[in-house]
Image: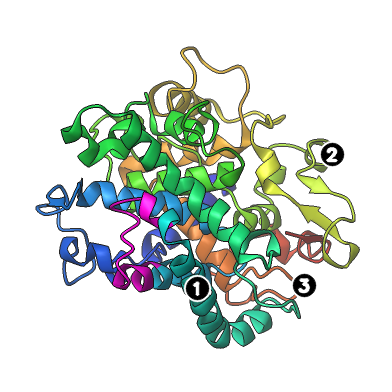
């Protein structure tokens, strides 16, 4: 097995054993659809709860969750979403069932966000600052804004207008029960859906959501919670891109995986590496800019064949073999080649990156390399510059 294949398998295996996604069993509107072990009750998820099915309500929650799940502290961000939802539901603001109620009761929502944020800050701030070697103020609002009105109306309000508009556009009352799910699954593949979630002229969330968040939602919908009803491989384990974030970029850079496919100059050209724009004047890794960047180094023939299969059959982004190998999709080919032996998929790989990035591969010059489960496979062990000279 090549070093690249071994690394991809090791990361995905770690992810398989360390899944981390929103704890929906703690969210009031979903209690009746969740088993005691925290898994979805498949016999109940399609039953009606007011105007919507349980599957529809959970999908609405996850779209919202993906948008707000971009703050500096994942644990805190997810707790904020849970706590605010539970608080306003107890006040009768059932914004998942009836999105318009979010805007009609904005005072209740704003008060809940401020209160819950304060409570989480009291619990999480010190530990978060210590883990990240930072003196920054603990703030879960995106763009580090302090204006809760902007945060609530834009980051919460925009994703809630999607099911609201779909309901307004739907003339069949019975179809409103699953209007968001039906819309999302109308696309040819999960990858196409993730793009349209942001870019569609009428229903796209635009600047309220990034590419990473679109793929995060897709991962949750297709793999984590298995909400997709389609048996097609275009809605399966390899049907969407990894939601690359700062943790993913840091791990893949330090391990040397990205540099297997192109020299550093290519990443600089595409502003994946931004000279001296990181913390303390170090080079900044902006991995979201890697989308569409082509590999200069070729894949082994059997891996390239899998890459073509991913593009044509799983993601359905190409009707013919793609001329370019995009770096952010290379791990898909290795995972698919190994799938019969391991059963591992894209979600496992992403969960592995998240686990390593948040538990060991911290964004400073003293990560826990000696304890890291992929330490023996990491080039950063012998090339300390990959760790010391870059930040995310």
Report the residue marked by disc 1.
111
Secondary-structure class at tag 3: loop
Q: Secondary structure at mark 1?
A: helix
Q: Residue at x 42, y 70 (%)?
A: 84
Q: Position of residue 16 (x, y in %)?
A: 38, 59
| 16 up-or-down from 336: above or below | below
Q: Earlier in the sequence, mark 1 or mark 2?
A: 1
Q: 271 left or right of 294?
A: right
Q: Is residue 42 left or right of residue 301?
A: left
**What residue is shown with label 3?**
365
Q: Is 101 part of what is drawn in magenta?
A: yes
What colour scheme has been applied to the protein in the rendered image?
Answer: rainbow
Label 2 – label 3 distance at C-alpha: 23 Å
Q: For the magenta stretch, what is the residue range?
A: 85-102
- Decide: few, some or many residues near mark 2? Use Cα within 10 Å; few <14, some 14-19, many ≥20: few
The C terminus - image quarter? bottom right
Q: 57 and 308: which one is in front?
A: 57
Furthest residue in direction left, as rendered? 43
Circle 2 SS class: helix
Q: Horizontal and vertical percent for residue 376?
A: 60, 65
Mark closer to the observer (1, 2):
1
Contact? badges 1 and 2 (CB < 8 Å): no
Q: Is residue 2 magenta?
A: no
Say the numbered circle drawn on residue 265. Answer: 2
Specify whether 260 is left or right of 283: left
The residue under the point 48% across, 67% down is 107
């Amino acid at each position: 097995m090549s070093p690249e294949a071994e690394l991809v398998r090791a990361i995905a295996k770690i992810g398989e054993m360390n899944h981390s996604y929103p704890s929906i069993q703690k969210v009031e509107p979903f209690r009746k659809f969740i088993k005691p072990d925290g898994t979805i009750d498949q016999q109940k998820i399609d039953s009606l709860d007011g105007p919507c099915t349980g599957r529809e309500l959970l999908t609405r929650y996850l779209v919202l969750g993906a948008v707000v799940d971009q703050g500096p502290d994942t644990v805190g961000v997810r707790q904020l979403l849970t706590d605010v939802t539970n608080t306003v539901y107890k006040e009768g603001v059932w914004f998942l069932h009836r999105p318009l109620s979010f805007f009609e009761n904005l005072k209740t929502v704003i008060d809940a966000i401020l209160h819950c944020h304060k409570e989480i800050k009291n619990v999480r701030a010190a530990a978060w600052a210590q883990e990240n070697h930072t003196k920054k103020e603990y703030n879960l609002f995106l763009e580090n804004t302090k204006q809760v009105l902007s945060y609530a109306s834009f980051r919460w309000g925009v994703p809630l207008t999607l099911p609201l508009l779909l309901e307004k556009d739907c003339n069949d009352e019975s179809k409103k029960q699953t209007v968001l799910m039906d819309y999302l699954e109308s696309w040819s593949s999960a990858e196409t859906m993730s793009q349209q979630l942001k870019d569609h002229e009428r229903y796209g969330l635009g600047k309220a959501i990034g590419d990473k968040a679109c793929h995060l939602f897709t991962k949750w919908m297709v793999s984590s919670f298995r909400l997709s009803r389609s048996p097609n491989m275009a809605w399966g384990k390899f049907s969407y891109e990894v939601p690359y974030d700062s943790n993913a970029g840091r791990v893949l850079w330090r391990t040397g995986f990205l540099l297997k496919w192109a020299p550093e100059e290519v990443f600089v050209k595409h502003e994946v590496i931004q000279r001296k724009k990181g913390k303390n004047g170090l080079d900044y890794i902006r991995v979201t800019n890697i989308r569409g960047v082509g590999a200069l180094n070729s894949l082994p023939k059997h891996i390239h064949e899998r890459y073509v299969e991913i593009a044509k059959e799983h993601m359905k982004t190409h009707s013919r073999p793609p001329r370019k190998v995009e770096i952010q999709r290379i791990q898909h080919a290795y995972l698919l080649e190994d799938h019969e032996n391991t059963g591992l998929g894209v979600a496992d790989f992403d969960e592995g990156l998240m686990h390593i990035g948040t538990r060991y591969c911290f964004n400073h010059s003293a990560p826990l390399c000696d304890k890291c489960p992929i330490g023996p496979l990491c080039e950063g062990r012998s090339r300390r510059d990959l760790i010391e000279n870059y930040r995310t």
